[in-house]
């Protein structure tokens, strides 16, 4: 499938696209695509549609950079989901934005949010919820949307996290949405 990857350095991408979008309170959906996700999208039509709904698909993996080079459509650099998350948290701290943390096991989610609270004290925690719920639960999505977060990090593994974002982002009036895989586990330490 054709994926239109972000062809910028991580710094350019943040400064030119993401920070201004956060500032304007746009609604944006970032998919961090590693080779596994690209393979999955080839065989799963629903997932392919989900990726096509993303505003930005970033190349998260050296495999994608190498494949792009072989196809003679080279990309600037790998943009790792984890690094991107840390940059978003730094920005949110600087500009006192609000973040919702959805995903991971209950204790991991709790620890990750505690870590954010201590490392990024100016971030408003819009709320948090573990990632073990019924993904068709529209009520939960409505409750999360009602907290009006600037950033929604969903750590439930792919393709669940991306499917959830695609299914429910219309309920939100603004926000930057990103599936962040195992990031909460790392933050929880
Ligand atoms: N996870 C979740 N709900 C689920 C399945 C997984 O919240 O239904 C969480 C899991 O606890 C872990 C995170 O998703 O914290 C990332 O899982 P995984 O490593 O499988 O995802 P990947 O990094 O491969 O996208």
Image (cartoon, rainbow, N blue to C red):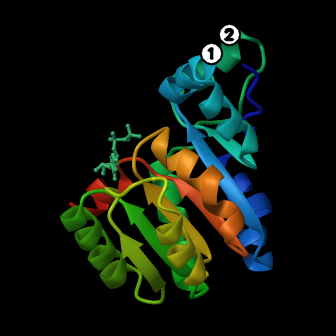
Residue at the limit of the structure toward the top, as seen here: 70
Which quarter of the figure is the C terminus placed in?
bottom left
Can I make out residue 8 in this image? no
Question: Where residue 152 appears, x then y in whole percent?
Answer: 54, 67
Question: Where residue 37 appears, x then y in whole percent?
Answer: 53, 29
Task: Find out whether the residues at labels 1 and 2 contact each other: C-beta distance under 8 Å.
Answer: yes
Circle 1 — which element? helix
Asked which quadrant contains residue 3, the reply is top right
Q: Residues within 10 Å of mark 2 (few under 14, many from 20)?
A: few
Asked which quadrant contains residue 72, the reply is top right
Which quarter of the figure is the N terminus placed in?
top right
Residue located at (77% from left, 32% from top): 4
Which residue is identified by label 2?
70
Q: Is residue 110 above or below residue 98?
A: above
Q: Choose between 109 and 138: the one closer to the eye.
A: 138
Which residue is identified by label 1?
67
Q: How many marks?
A: 2
Circle 2 — which element? helix
Question: Where residue 73 appears, x then y in whole percent?
Answer: 78, 20
Residue located at (66% from left, 40% from top): 50
Residue located at (75% from left, 78% from top): 23
Q: Is residue 59 above or below residue 163?
A: above
Q: Choose between 80 and 9: the one closer to the eye.
A: 80
Residue located at (50% from left, 70% from top): 139
Q: Residues within 10 Å of mark 1 (few under 14, many from 20)?
A: some
Give the left or right position of residue 46, taking residue 180 as reference: right
Give the left or right position of residue 114, taking residue 123 as reference: left
């Amino acid at each position: 499938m054709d994926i239109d990857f972000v062809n910028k350095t991580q710094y350019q991408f943040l400064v030119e696209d993401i920070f201004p979008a956060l500032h304007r309170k746009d609604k944006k959906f970032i998919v961090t695509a590693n080779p596994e996700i690209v393979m999955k999208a080839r065989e799963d039509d629903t997932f392919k549609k989900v990726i096509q709904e993303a505003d930005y698909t970033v190349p998260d993996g050296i495999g994608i950079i190498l494949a792009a080079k072989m196809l003679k459509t080279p990309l600037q650099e790998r943009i790792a989901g984890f690094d991107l998350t840390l940059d978003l948290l730094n920005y949110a701290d600087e500009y006192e934005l609000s973040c919702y943390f959805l995903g991971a096991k209950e204790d991991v989610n709790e620890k990750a949010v505690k870590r954010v609270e201590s490392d990024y004290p100016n971030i408003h925690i819009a709320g948090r919820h573990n990632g073990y719920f019924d993904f068709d639960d529209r009520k939960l999505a409505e409750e999360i949307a009602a907290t009006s977060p600037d950033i929604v990090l969903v750590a439930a593994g792919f393709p669940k996290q991306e499917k959830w974002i695609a299914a429910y982002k219309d309920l939100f009036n603004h926000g930057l949405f990103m599936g962040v895989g195992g990031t909460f586990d790392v933050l929880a330490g």
